[in-house]
Amino acid sequence: MFFPPVPGPVTYVEPFRRRVRGLLAGTAVVDSDAVLLVHRPDQPPAYAFPDADVDLDAKASLPDVNGYVIVPWDAVDAWLEEEEPVLMHPRNPYHRVDCLQSRRRLQVEAGGVVVVDTVQTVAVYETALEPRLYVSPQLVMGGGLESSPTRTYCRYKGEASYWNLVIGHLVVADAAWSYERPLAESAPILGLVSFDETRVSMAMDLPGPVALTRSL
């Protein structure tokens, strides 16, 4: 929250000092060292390039900056920052993931069985998201976790593997997820699991939101 509030809609444009390329059939059709990063409300960041650095018809002028264009993400086969692949969208440089060893209590129940009740947790504080607690799968009791084929990808934590919770004959599909190869900033949650509160009953000892008042 900003005081005074930021008027909307606002577009924030800043220099992005990395080489960015877009590859189509193995050929760089976008190649620029003069990239801008464009932030718009409720959207992930987007690249903007000097028109001369784009050899594609699929582009649109950037109204905020003369001579710059936006290329649709799916207009190319692959995007690279320097030599690193970029998946889904550019990473927001203001987005943080902090993983902190904690003693906050996590309780998980399904089918009338308590499957987790521990204070051996890792608290994950991620920009713009509610805090979450992760635990070792070895702390799951009264049931077990079996691998699910479901996979998702987080631009800031990596690929998530999902787990079904099995309690006797009860199977709760995709009840938990983990990051088996997390990105560097999320390394402390390697192999730990977090539970989906829409599929199990869960209580997390986490701080609530703070109500802010403005001084005049």
Image: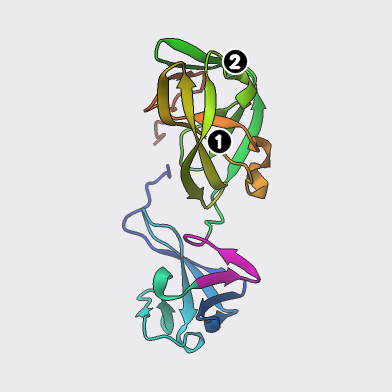
Residue 118: give its label: 2
Q: Residue at x 44, y 80 (%)?
A: 68
From this view, report whether residue 17 is shown above or below residue 53: above
Vertical arrangement, residue 45 with respect to residue 67, above or below:
above
Residue extending farthest to the front is 169
Q: Residues within 10 Å of mark 1 (few under 14, many from 20)?
A: some
Q: Is residue 45 above or below residue 113?
A: below
Which amino acid lies under the numbered mark 2 shown in the image of this protein? Thr
Q: Quadrant of the C terminus?
A: top left
Is residue 134 covered in magenta? no
- Identity, as a three-letter code, of the amino acid under mark 1: Tyr
- Quarter of the picture containing the N terminus is top left
Helix, strand or loop under label 2 = strand
Mark 1: secondary structure: strand
**Residue occupied by mark 1:** 125
Q: Is residue 121 visible?
A: no
Q: Over which residues does the magenta segment extend? A: 78-90
Q: Position of residue 103 (x, y in %)?
A: 64, 19
Q: Of 171 and 7, which appears nearest the observer?
A: 171
Instruction: Kindly report the distance in space between the C-alpha atoms of the residues bearing marks 1 and 2.
Output: 19 Å
Residue at the spot 53% in from the left edge and 27% down from the top edge: 145
